[in-house]
Amino acid sequence: MSSKKLIYLDHAATTPADPEVVLAMEPYWRDVAANPSSLHRCGQAAIKAVDEAREAIATFMGAAHPREIIFTGSATEANNLAIRGIVKNSVFDKPHVVTTAIEHASVLETVRALARQNFASQNLGGREQTGTIEATILPVGSDGRVSPDAVRAAVKENTALVSIGYANNEIGTLQPVAEIAKVIREFRKTQSPRLQPPASSLQHPVFHTDAVQAAPWLDVDVKKLGVDMMTISAHKMYGPKGAGALYVKDGIQLEPVIYGGGQEYGLRSGTENVPAIVGFAKAAEMTGEWKKSAANIGVIEKFRDDAWKEVQAIAPNAELNGPVKNRLPNNLNIFIPDVDPEIFLVALSEDGICVSSGSACAARALGESHVITAIGKGGNDGCHLRITFGRQTTEDDIRALVAAMKKRLSV
Ligand code: PLP
């Protein structure tokens, strides 16, 4: 490998932990290392740190109360808890779940798994059942947007859950989450209270959004968005890997996915990862402050737009994947026809430019991206390139990216 300086432009895959986050975590590996469930003073110090972190995350998400925040080991796990938790606790024989074709795999594959799960081994009194749930996977437009009207048309009496991500991890599309929430609230008014789960103050369907990619850049206030559940991940916002959180609005009854000692209000058993939770909270506080500044966001948007202009000058046949507006400020996803993606990515990497061809998981699986297919751009010969900028990205980084692309595309 060459000794060239590495330029990291893959912030949708993960972000480096901020040095202040690392510092905040440090005492919790060693000095405050007791089990938060222990009743002695050492354990009390650890649970205090978890409680404070819960408050910080509640503030970050605009939750009404810290108890609405459930810490998990990842956003993947939080999405599983949201979906499986509602389905398992549903009053419907066969709950209906609505999602979109461009969700992150942790949503889409969970929904698909539930839809195909075979109950043949269970006594269903002669009834045939091919899946635990009925699923509607909504298509998206060529910009990756799902229309609130499509959601209105899809929800029905047995719809237990609508799960639609706020910002797409590959093409950066922002969904009209607040409008969809309104559609769902209107639908609820038409539903008979008899179908409400007992002890729940909320009518179905519950609206969940995966805000993992939106959280570093946009306001993710759950009240303003009108969502009932929301997922975020620490490592996408300069926190540690291995920490996620699920906001669960008071009154929503979930069945756990992981059973055990009853931590996290009984919804996620397992000894809390105190250092990661503390780091998550620090990252959320810093991110909350950082994104308050329109100037900060503006700088990132300018990098994105300048880079796109430069790419168009180098490769006039390049196309933008995803929308021009309603897009994450840090996401540039482009299609360059007739360029071999593997060769191009490796060549850029040799020049020290770390970008990706889609999501990190899809890249390992080496399949065609389901997002690119869903926006109607699958099967074309060429390279889909995802470039995602970060808070530390500089103009020099953009210049190096453009120079490397120019060098590799003009051979
Ligand atoms: N949801 C979205 C939109 C993501 O981009 C990712 C990570 O790529 C996840 C969920 C999963 O996050 P984690 O790595 O914390 O499981």
Image (cartoon, helix red, strand yellow):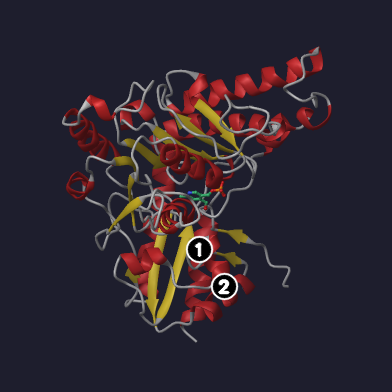
Q: Residue at x 42, y 55 (%)?
A: 108
Marks 2/1 in contact by CB < 8 Å: the verdict is: no
* The CB of the residue at mark 1 lies under 8 Å from ligand 1: no
Which residue appears farthest toward the right when viewing the image? 30
* 7 is higher (above) or lower (below) than 257: below
> Which residue reaches farthest front?
125
Marks 2 and 1 sit apart, C-alpha to C-alpha, by: 13 Å
Picture quadrant where residue 31 is located: top right
Mark number displayed over residue 365 = none
Graded by Cα atoms within 10 Å as few (under 14), some (14 to 19) or many (20 or more), the crowding at tag 2 reads: some
Determine whether, in the image, residue 23 is placed left or right of residue 72.
right
Q: In this view, does 265 lie to the left or right of 101?
A: right
Image quarter of the N terminus: bottom right
Element on which disc 1 rests: helix
Q: Residue 85, image x and y in percent? A: 47, 38
Q: Nearer the viewer, residue 95 or 267?
A: 95
Q: Can residue 215 be seen in this view?
A: no
Left or right, 137 with reference to 343: left
Report which residue position mark 2 lands on: 348
Q: Is residue 79 visible?
A: yes
In the rendering, at what x and y percent does residue 251 appear? 40, 22
Q: Name the residue under label 1.
A: 399
Is 328 or 234 nearer to us in this picture? 234
Amino acid type at circle 2 is Leu
Between 8 and 100, the one lying in front of the other is 100
Q: Type of residue at label 1?
A: Arg
Query: Which residue: 66% across, 29% down?
Result: 278
